[in-house]
Image: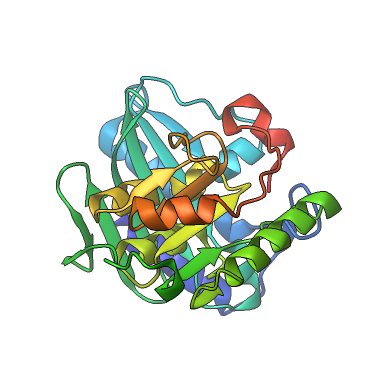
Amino acid sequence: MFFCICTQEIRKAGESEIKVSTKSSTVDLVTKTDERVEKIIINSLKQEFGDNTYSFIGEESVANGKPCILTDKPTWIIDPVDGTTNFVHGFPFVAVSIAFAVKKQLEFGVVYSCLEDKMYKARRGKGAFCNDELIQVSDVKDIHKSIIISEHGTDRNPEKVTKIFSTMQKILRIPVHGLRGSGTAATNMCLVACGAVEAFFEIGIHCWDIAAGAVIVTEAGGILLDVDGGPFDLMSRRMVSANNNVIAERIIREIEIFPVERDDTNVSKNQT
């Protein structure tokens, strides 16, 4: 299984010198491991299923200029190392995320938290699992008893940073039990799915960060919404995932929205 190979690559790189470059800014990192792992995944899928039947959206492929457009064609959506900054610093949350969509409908997703050795998976209509144990979201409806996860991304535009931290302050003052962040959107969504936290929201994420997690959250009984309360749009780069509508809608009231370019517009020029 290529997850084993990917994990070996990630762990091997973590024990040796890591070659790091940047994408859009000095805090938007990419390593040779990201690129190697993505190639391993795509080559393995092509060998198993063929080159012509499927499309691929991979974080590093898009960063290198390939289009990020979700069509009706069966499509693999891949984040080879979600949490690259964590990986570089040895912060122990790093995930491989793979989703599959047909006619723009997400059909299944797998998130492997490599250093925790936790495999999250879900198929539409079949439930969500962690290491083959059925999981489900928290039943908390009182926002005051919730833990909320968010991330601040890699964009250091002063206006955006101000809005991000203003939102966090407003949510803390509700008050909630706490705000957290693992540094990987895929892991954050799995924490919602297994009931460890009540919600995760972020503006500036990408489709490969959340595609697999989207299936896992919904199959665990959770919901996905846009940060303005509208329907979830995988390509919009903004999302609230929560255990229920009560928690989601309360968080949405506090979010200060700022513009981000859609993934299917010109993502290769605006990595975050």
Total residue callouts:
0
Question: In percent of the image, x 51 and y 46: which residue is there?
Answer: 239
Q: Which percent across, then down, holds residue 152? A: 66, 60
Indicate left or right for 216 with 200 as reference: left
Give the vertical position of 207 relative to 82 (above or below).
Answer: above
Indicate left or right for 63 with 196 as reference: right
Q: Closer to the camera, 86 or 189? A: 189
Residue 64, image quadrant: top right
Residue 194, image quadrant: bottom left
Indicate left or right for 212 with 250 as reference: left
Question: In percent of the image, x 56 and y 51: which residue is there?
Answer: 253
Q: Closer to the camera, 88 or 111? A: 111
Quadrant (top left/top right/bottom left/bottom right) for the N terminus = bottom left
Could one spot residue 87 in this view of the protein? no
Give the vertical position of 231 relative to 170 (above or below).
Answer: above
Question: In percent of the image, x 65 and y 40: which residue is there?
Answer: 63
Question: In percent of the image, x 42 and y 21: which residue is there?
Answer: 71
Q: Which residue is situated farthest in the right direction here?
A: 158
Q: Closer to the camera, 44 or 117? A: 117
Q: Which percent across, then down, holds residue 160? A: 77, 51
Judging from the image, the colouring scheme is rainbow
Q: Which percent across, then down, holds residue 19? A: 70, 65
Could one spot residue 27 in this view of the protein? yes
Q: Closer to the camera, 65 or 221? A: 221
Q: Which percent across, then down, holds residue 157? A: 82, 51
Give the vertical position of 11 relative to 208 (above or below).
Answer: below
Indicate left or right for 265 with 95 as reference: right
